Amino acid sequence: MGSESDFLVQFKNVQKSYDGVHLVVKDFNVDMVKGEFLTMLGPSGSGKTTCLMMLAGFETATNGQIILDGQSINNVAPHKRDIGMVFQNYALFPHMTVAENLAFPLRVRKMGQSEVTDKVNRALKMVRLDTFANRRPAQLSGGQQQRVAVARALVFEPKLVLMDEPLGALDKNLREEMQYEIKHIHEDLGVTMLYVTHDQVEALTMSDRIAVFDDGIVQQLASPQSLYEQPCNAFVANFIGENNRLMGKVLSVSGDTCSVELQGGGGTVQAKKVNVGQVGDATTLSLRPERVLVNPAQGSCANLVNATVEELIYHGDHTRTRVSISGSSDFIIKVPNTHNQQHMKKGEAIRIGWDTDDCRALDA
Amino acid sequence: MANTYSKVGEMTTNDGVPLKVSLRRSQRKLKLWAFLLVAPLLVFILVSFIIPVVNMTLRGVENPQVINIMPNVVAELENWQGTQLPDEAVYAALVTDLTMGRKNKNIGKVATRLNYERSGMRRVITGSARKASKLKEGPYKEQMIKINKAWADVGVWSLIKRESGAFTSSYMISAVDRKTNDAGEIVAKIEDKQIYVNLFGKTLLMSFSITIICIVLAFPIAYLLATLPLAKSNLLMILVLLPFWTSLLVRTTTWIVLLQSQGVVNDLLVWMHIIDEDGRLQMIYNQTGTIIAMTHILLPFMVLPLYSVMKTIPPSYMRAALSLGANPVTAFIKVYIPMTVSGIGAGSLLVFILSIGYYITPALVGGQSGLLISNMIAYHMQNSLNWGLAGALGFILLVIVMLFYALFNKVIGIDKMKMG
Amino acid sequence: MKKLLKRTIVATAIAAVSMTMATTAVQAADTMTVVSWGGSYTKSQERAYQEPWTKMHGTKFLSEDKAGTGLAGIRSQVEANNVTWDLVDMLEGDSMIACDEGLIEEIDYDTILAAAPDGTPASKDFLGGMNGCFIPQIVYATLFAYNDELFPGEKPSTIADIFDLEKFPGKRSLQKIPDGNLEWALMASGVAADKVYEKLDTEEGIAMAFKKLDEIKDSVVWWEAGAQPPQLLADKEVSIASGFNGRFFGAQVNEKQPFTIIWDGQLAEIDGWVVPKGKLTDDLKAYLKFATDTQRLADQSKFISYGPARASSAALVGKHADTGIDMKPHMPTNPENFKNPIIKNAEWWANNKDDMNERFNAWLAK
């Protein structure tokens, strides 16, 4: 992904332990290029925020190197790192006005008055809050506070901006709006951003690359598309997007496909071999609900399985259809509501099918 | 729906009852309940606080003695000009009143009252009363002057006339080191008798110093309490609260044991050859002692509000300041401290007002220089028995406290305070 | 569980009711609330009068150590119309004020109090202070004592020595009231003991007294409770202290402290009983008659070195009840000790107390 000097941030074999017994971050390695929007996604307690705090300098790495712009910053004090940060609770200083909040990083850098005013105004304009300069944070709505926090993290033109679940406190509509706004700011300014969230939709819509965390380890680091389309293990497949899981046992392997015998007596299916061991090992088959076809034309699918309709939920553009297959009853199919779609009834026996490439055989 | 507007602009319910009336009716029961819940506390405060305060303040202006016990003199003096001795009628009234007062055994109250204003009046009144009751017939003027030549002093008569109202300003005047002279002008007392104004000043100054010391000492403790892990902060909290759980007297006498010139601290200093035997420090029975002991006692009142405020400040604010490029000291001063202002304010108000009114500790360890105005009030309540003056001093103290409260409200805002 | 709860409640209620009844019963069975100065002084009163009286009549005595604020207490109780004290120990000066204000009962000395054994009526037998309400009890002295160990060479012996910080170095301890201090300051300035009140009647005399006090002000530790001066002397916090002679005696005898009393310039004052308004019952009269008779007053001097206030008691003063020390040489009224006393002028103080207190407090605060 480019030469060593293009990397703005590098984590090299970083480990972190609070108690000397357990590792919260087991072995973290990542390289961020300049201008990239990288998201660390994972459930709470997965170590993603700890990595962010180590980069910001509020936690020290127990082992390993953190490199910013070619320099090791393990021993650099937080205020000398020149990293902007947006906090989950915004951490706007309540005793200062919006303008004073924005001016704070400039004043501590001993910037001249006119320059400060200039930059503050520009930053406020960027987040469309120029008329709110003299308000206190408490007089702003959540979304406005959020924008001030972003503007404050950017106003001093840091090399890197960190965001720690910045949209967590907003309601759904506002959250989506802010996602786009942050994304646009990122594109317009070309600033490098490292973003932490546990919301996969947020991660998918905003990021260039996503590092999926679990249990102190990066499970997969890839673009949103390949994370969704090509999850490399069961955790990622499950965590990103909606996913159907079928348990089975590998019967044979040929090239990049393998045949798997479904648990529960549903027969044998063909799957793309992604993350399986030898013949005889257990595996999890991952299937996206929208890639499953109902009563496909004979011969159009490599795999065909019998199923029974358990539940139908109307969702407007599609109908969520829960079917039982091979002994498990939580298999979901998204059936698009196109006009030539046939109508199913509860209890109806159907046949469902999928392409071999859409069914990924992953670790058990 | 047609009934909703009976007249233009007045909303009614569907029954045609004005909406406001209906609302009031529906809330009446709730309000009654709320009042009943508050009532016990209200009664308690009224009985144990407000009535005594009002009563005490009234004592500072009440003047029942002369008007009640010498009614005839008061009536006769009404038209007296005050330039020369009153005429026979006044003296006759004086004899009547003194005789009655002696018979009723309450002439001493007048004597005590007038003695506050002018030394020696006790002897004049009680002595004259004893002899006046033996006088057979008038004219009385000559006879009374013969009994005590004070009755030939226009100043004495001016004093009686001045104090013949049901209310007096003389306690208030006295409480600010002033007095009314024979000519009726308010003038400063002789320097040897001026005490209260200085004492008020000293009280404010010492309370201010104690408050500042408390802030300086409490801030780091509160910060530790708010940031340490729970197990450790609980232990620390117990240490902070420990003074609350020991008797005030025990704590104060402990300081005496520690600080007196043959005490532990001095012994230690002598033993370490920091001072020699003759150079033992006087740390108690003076202002130093008062400040040390009171700071110790009042410290928790500063720690607790500070702690409760600091507890609510997430670490992200300091981190935000650091990440924005402020060094730790700047971040602390510019961001952290301003966010604790409400706690500092609440603590300061508590400590300041408490120390203005403190009197047990200064009485025990204050010696002569460490006394506060409240000791003077207690002294007048218990020893000199001049309750009028005590009431006046107490009232002035109350006014000062309220002024500070108002000032504080203006600067910081009471609504922003956090008491803990 | 419910039954247990019920039983507990009933039991508690019964206990509470019976306790209330018991208290009332005790009070009904003749108790007397006596206010005095506390410490060894109250003890001496208990042993000399109260215990024998209880033995004879079963009366229970409740002691309150509030004589220090006795006048304030009586005044507030009388004003609130809720007098709980039966008998109050008071100084002669305060009793004059209380008497004038009608706060205490008038006493007809010869009918209420016992005559001397030789038939002298009470009004002639008591040493003084009979202002119509006050029943004298003891003569005590406020005087100076020093710690021997602090003066290995020459010892202080006069009032003038006390004000001489150069010749007799060390801190002084004085009572935090003007009474006594002003008189001594004048004596130290050369005024004769029997002329001090004459002098204090002049503005010049008062100024002179305060000027003399100025000389030692910085070396004074002020005391307020009678127990403090012996303690301060024992701790060597001060070298010379003023105090009540009985307290110094107690420290000398009971604690074997190396104290020496300076009898020169002792301020002799009479202390006695007063009866708050409305409390002069027949029971109380009977007790007063007993407690102030010649023998009882002499008995009190077995326990504390205060002189009985009756002339007829003097001859009966004997030995200390616990140590067997002859008490006569320790009496303030002993001729050997009574060579140059100041007799406290209670009337002068009643008239000038407000004024002197004001000046004294202002002077202290300066």
Image (cartoon, coloured by chain):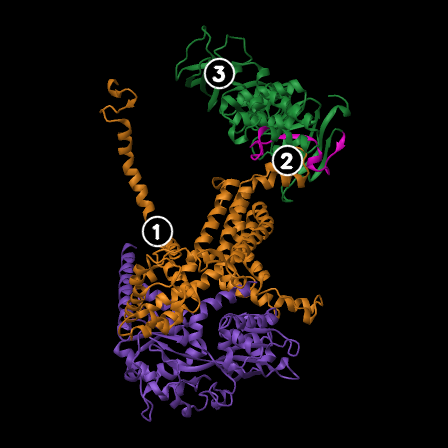
Question: Where are the magenta residues, as a range?
Answer: A70-98
The residue at which mark 1 appears reads as B46
Q: Is residue A363 something one can see in this rendering?
A: no
The residue at the point 61 percent across, 82 percent down is: C156
What is the distance, in whole Å, between disc 3 and disc 1 at their CAs? Answer: 72 Å
Secondary structure type for disc 3: strand
Chain letter behind tag 3: A
The chain painted orange is B
Residue B388, percent from left and from top: 40, 59
Q: Evaluate whether residue C56 shows in this view.
A: yes
Disc 3 marks which residue?
A334
Residue B268 — which label?
none
Which is more toward the observer, B347 or B73? B73
Q: Amino acid at mark 1?
A: Leu
How far separated are the C-alphas under marks 2 and 3? 48 Å
Chain drawn in green: A
Eyeballing the image, is B373 above or below A69? below
Q: Is residue A85 magenta?
A: yes
Mark closer to the observer (2, 3)? 2
Q: Quadrant of residue B32?
A: top left
Q: Chain of mark 2?
A: B
Considering the numbered disc 1 on the image, is that residue within a helix, a strand or a loop? Answer: helix
The chain under label 1 reads B
Q: Quadrant of residue A188?
A: top right
Q: Tell me if residue B110 comes above or below residue A51 in the rendering.
A: below
Amino acid type of the residue that numbered disc 2 sits on in the rendered structure? Ala
Q: Main secondary structure of the magenta part?
A: loop
Same subunit under labels 3 and 1? no
- Disc nearer the start of the sequence (2/1): 1
The shade of chain C is purple
